[in-house]
Image (cartoon, rainbow, N blue to C red):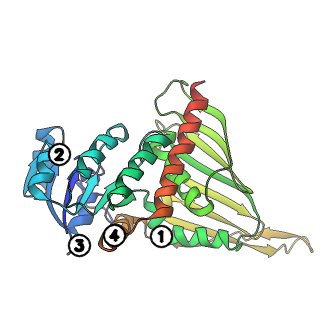
Amino acid sequence: MDVVIIGCGKIAGGYDAGPQSPGIRTHVRAYQNRSDTRLVAVCDSDPVRARNFARKWKVPRCYHDIGLMLKETQPQLVSICVPAPAQETVVKSCLSSKSIRGLWCEKPFGITQTQALRMAGSIRGERIALVVNHQRQNEPGHRQLGQKIRNGKLGEIQQVLAFYTNGVLCNATHWLQLFASWFGPADDVKLLRVHGPRAQSDPTVDAFLRFGKIPIHLLGLEGKHYSEFSLQIWGSKGFVGINRYGLSIEEKRVLSDPDFPGSFQLEEQPAQSATQLNDAMQHTLEHLVKLATRRRWDEAGVASAVEAVRIAENLKKQAHR
C-alpha cells in the first residue's frame, strides 16, 4: 500500500529522530518497518519542515498542499498527524480522494464530541477504515488486562487511580479511551479540581468517573515537575498496576496473612511483566492494514475514541464555569 503522512511533527517522525531507542514510536518508522507499506510523500503547512522531514527519512516527495499531494500520489493509507483543531479540515480533504482506504489519525480525535461524531460519520460513509492512535488499545498486555477485569479475575473493583500530566484532552484521553474500551461509556463525570488557571484551553484536572459500578479517580499532576502516566487497580481478588507509561504491569494476589490467622493481605512482591508498548505503533498499523484491506469499520475502537473526547469535553466545560 502507498501511504502519505500529513503533519511532520514529533509523532510523525520526531520522536525517532534522535538516538535510537527501543521500539518504534512514530508513524514514519512504523511504515518503513513493513514490507507492504511504502511511504511515498509527506505534507506540512511549513514547506521547510516538510522538506527537512523528507530528507531525514528518505521520503521521495514532499508537499505543503494536501490536495495536490493526494491527487499526484493516490495513496491507500494516510496518517493525519496535525493538531486536533485542524483534523476535520484535513479529513475533508482526504475524503475527496477515491484511492484512500484507511486513515490513521492522531489523538485526541477532535476537540468536541460533535466534531468527533461528524468526522467519524463522514469517514464511515466513504467506506474508509479509521484508527485513532490510542496505542494501548491495541497492545496485547492492556487488552488482556481489560479482559481479565471484565471476566471477574480481579473480583469486584473497589478503587481505580489513574495518574497523568499535561492536559485532560491531550494526555488524559489515553486513559479515558482505554476505560471506554474496557467498560463502555462513562455513567458519571464529576470535576474535583483544576490545576492552574480554570480558563486554560486544555486544563489538567482531577475528576471522579464511574463506568457502571467501577469507580475511577482521574488525578492530574503538573508536568513542569516531571511526567507521570500510571494506573492502580484494587479489586477484591487482587491488585494490578500499570507503570512506566504502560511499559510494565505488576500484579499482586490475595494471600492468607501469616501473622493474623483468618485475615488476608496482598502479597508483598508483585509479579512483574513487560508489555509490548514499544511495539504499539506496529500493532496499531497492523490493525489498520487489516481493516483497510477488508473494508471493515472498527465500531468499538472508534466509539471509545469518541467517548474519550466526550468525557474530556465535559470536564473542560465544568472547569470553565
Distance between the alpha carbons at the discs numbered 4 and 3? 20 Å
Report crowding for label 3: few under 14, some 14 to 19, many 20 or more residues within 10 A (C-alpha). Answer: few
Counting residues from the N terminus, which is met first, the one under dot 4 or under dot 3?
A: 3
Q: Which residue is mark 2?
A: 66
Look at the numbered discs 2 and 4 and tell me whether their residues touch, using CB distance below 8 Å. Answer: no
Q: Which residue is mark 4?
A: 295
Q: Secondary structure at mark 4?
A: loop
Look at the numbered discs 4 and 3 and tell me whether their residues touch, using CB distance below 8 Å. Answer: no
The residue that appears at 54% across and 58% down in the rendered structure is: 178
Asked which quadrant contains residue 232, the reply is: bottom right
Distance between the alpha carbons at the discs numbered 1 and 3? 21 Å
Query: Type of residue at label 4?
Result: Arg
Distance between the alpha carbons at the discs numbered 2 and 3? 24 Å
- Left-right relation of 17 to 210: left
From the viewer's side, name the closer residue of 62 and 127. 127
Closer mark to the observer between disc 4 and disc 3: 4
Look at the numbered discs 2 and 1 and tell me whether their residues touch, using CB distance below 8 Å. Answer: no
Distance between the alpha carbons at the discs numbered 2 and 4? 24 Å
From the viewer's side, name the closer residue of 159 and 263. 159
Query: Type of residue at label 2?
Result: Ile
Q: Which residue is mark 3?
A: 34
Q: Which residue is mark 1?
A: 275
